[in-house]
Image: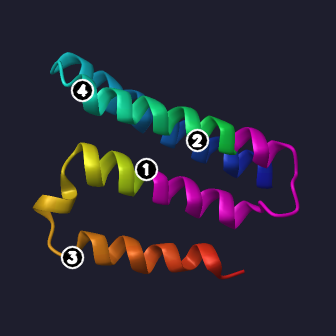
Amino acid sequence: MRLKKINYFNIIIYTMYIISIGYFLLNKNYTNASLCSVTFIFNLILRYLYSKNLPVLDTNLYVIGSLFIFFSLVLGSSFKLYDIVNHYDDFLHFGSGFLNVK
């Protein structure tokens, strides 16, 4: 059951990455498209490490880490949520605290 939930999570987050990359490519915003592509590749590497069952990378750390990367780099930087939403950075700093809790 654990692997099935992670597969659904991966499908959702990979779809959001692909939609974001496509959106920026259609708008000829290649800087943000490349940022989304690099973070997508980094997320694939994180998924690979998770699939190797490393004792350091458990399910909660994988999910929260993937969400933090998406929210900070794709939504925050590429879609400019740092400028649009007040205290978005504070929200991410609060959320990143869950990366340290085990």
Quarter the C terminus occupies: bottom right
Answer with left or right where residue 93 lies relative to residue 30. right
Q: CB atoms at circles 4 and 3 under 8 Å apart?
A: no
Q: Is residue 87 magenta?
A: no
The residue singled out by tag 4 in the image is 24
Instruction: Tell me which label, 1 or 3, sits earlier in the chain.
Output: 1
Q: Nearer the viewer, residue 6 or 36?
A: 36
Which residue is drawn at the image coordinates 38% and 70% (left, top)? 92
- Alpha-carbon span between mark 1 and mark 4: 15 Å
The residue singled out by tag 1 in the image is 70
Which residue is drawn at the image coordinates 63% and 35% (left, top)? 44
- Alpha-carbon span between mark 1 and mark 2: 9 Å
- Alpha-carbon span between mark 1 and mark 3: 17 Å
> Which contiguous range is marked in magenta?
47-69
Q: Nearer the viewer, residue 33 or 15?
A: 33
Please determine whether, in this image, residue 39 is positioned above or below residue 62. above
Q: Secondary structure at mark 3?
A: loop
Instruction: Tell me which label, 1 or 4, sits earlier in the chain.
Output: 4
Query: In the rendering, at what x and y percent does residue 79 appear?
Result: 22, 45
Model colouring: rainbow
Q: Amino acid at mark 1?
A: Phe
Q: Nearer the viewer, residue 76 or 18?
A: 76
**Marker disc for residue 43:** 2
- Alpha-carbon span between mark 4 and mark 2: 19 Å
Q: Amino acid at mark 2?
A: Asn
- Alpha-carbon span between mark 4 and mark 3: 25 Å
**Marker disc for residue 87:** 3
Q: Amino acid at mark 4?
A: Phe
Query: In the rendering, at what x and y percent does residue 41 appear?
Result: 56, 32
Query: In the rendering, at what x and y percent does residue 3 appear?
Result: 78, 48
